[in-house]
Image (spheres, rainbow, N blue to C red):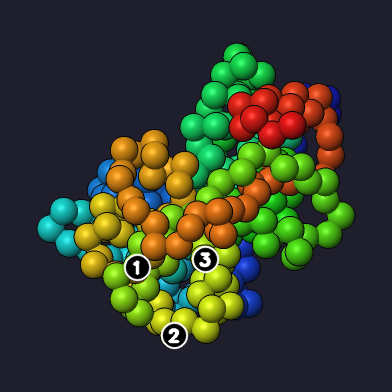
Amino acid sequence: MSENELNIEPSVALRIEGQRLTPRQLEVLVAVYEEGSQNKAAARLGISTPVLHRYIAQIEGKLSCPLITTSSSGSRLNELGERIVMEYEALAHRMRRDRTTVIGGTIITEELLLNALSRVDPEGNCELIISDDARNLKDFRAGMMDIVILDDPMHLFDLEGVIWQEITADRLLHVDNGSQYVRFMYGAQRIGFRHLDALGVEYSIEHSYRSIPALLASGRSFFINESLALRKGLRIKSATDPAYLEHRINAVYRKETSIVRRLVRRLRREGRVV
């Protein structure tokens, strides 16, 4: 093989509490995470199940804590194991040479993004990731996202060296079932709770939910975006005039590429912000 034919690729590793996990060890964790079974993970990796067990034991020995939870339905990673896999995959994604434009949004803006991308990216070259503001911002700061659509405009105060544009407006609906509140993981929740603070309302936040049915079934007070409630067909009477809880949803990016420029323009059109 000549020098020009050599395949040279970067290799990803993670260091956790001073302990380095090798690419092979990380591949083992990813396989268990994605397969939900140690037997299936071993088959996928082309190794025997006892060998896979040894890999896992080595990793857990390095970190001095368990990473696997086993039940009758199979094996899965615990919370720490999943965090390691997420960080590894994010880092691996960042190192890809052929990375496409990556866009982050939440369930609040998912439909808006899908409609806009259908127009500006008909070939499907862009990658859309739906998570929450906190996770999307973490990936954006790490350079793994090109543009993020933020539900909460208060995040703009924490960002430097970025370009941002208003995309659309939304309002929070306030369900008042007493002083015990639950936090929905999406939307400009801080605006709702700051409104309570400004009024001098005493309250406590008991739990956080990602599920709308769980939110509704909690019996607690909460805030939810009006646009999302309308899309889900929810009839919610707000205890606070939504006009007091109106806010802007913003697109944040560092570099105005052609696709970013077209996407932002389309999002503003879809969101009817002029």
Seen at 82% across and 30% down, the residue is: 257
Separation (CA) of disc 1 from disc 3: 12 Å
Seen at 64% across and 46% down, the residue is: 249
Amino acid type at image mark 3: Gly
Separation (CA) of disc 1 from disc 2: 13 Å
Is 259 placed above or below 17 here?
Answer: above
Is 184 placed above or below 1 here?
Answer: below
Q: Residues within 10 Å of mark 2 (few under 14, many from 20)?
A: few
Q: In this figure, which residue is indicated by the disc labeled 3?
A: 192
Separation (CA) of disc 3 from disc 2: 13 Å
Tell me the SS state at disc 1: loop
Q: Does residue 144 appear in the picture of this structure?
A: no
Amino acid type at image mark 1: Asp
- Residue 194 as seen in the image, left or right of residue 107: right
Direction left: furthest residue: 72
Q: If the image is split into quadrants, where does the N terminus sit?
A: top right
Measured from the top left, where is residue 233 in percent x and y?
A: 31, 38
Amino acid type at image mark 2: Glu
- Residue 118 as seen in the image, left or right of residue 210: right
Q: If the image is split into quadrants, where does the C terminus sit?
A: top right
Measured from the top left, where is residue 94 in percent x and y?
A: 68, 45
Seen at 45% across and 47% down, the residue is: 226
Q: Does residue 229 appear in the picture of this structure?
A: yes
Measured from the top left, where is residue 74 in percent x and y?
A: 20, 54
Q: Earlier in the sequence, mark 3 or mark 2?
A: 3
Measured from the top left, where is residue 26 in percent x and y?
A: 51, 55
Q: Earlier in the sequence, mark 1 or mark 2?
A: 1
Q: Earlier in the sequence, mark 1 or mark 3?
A: 1
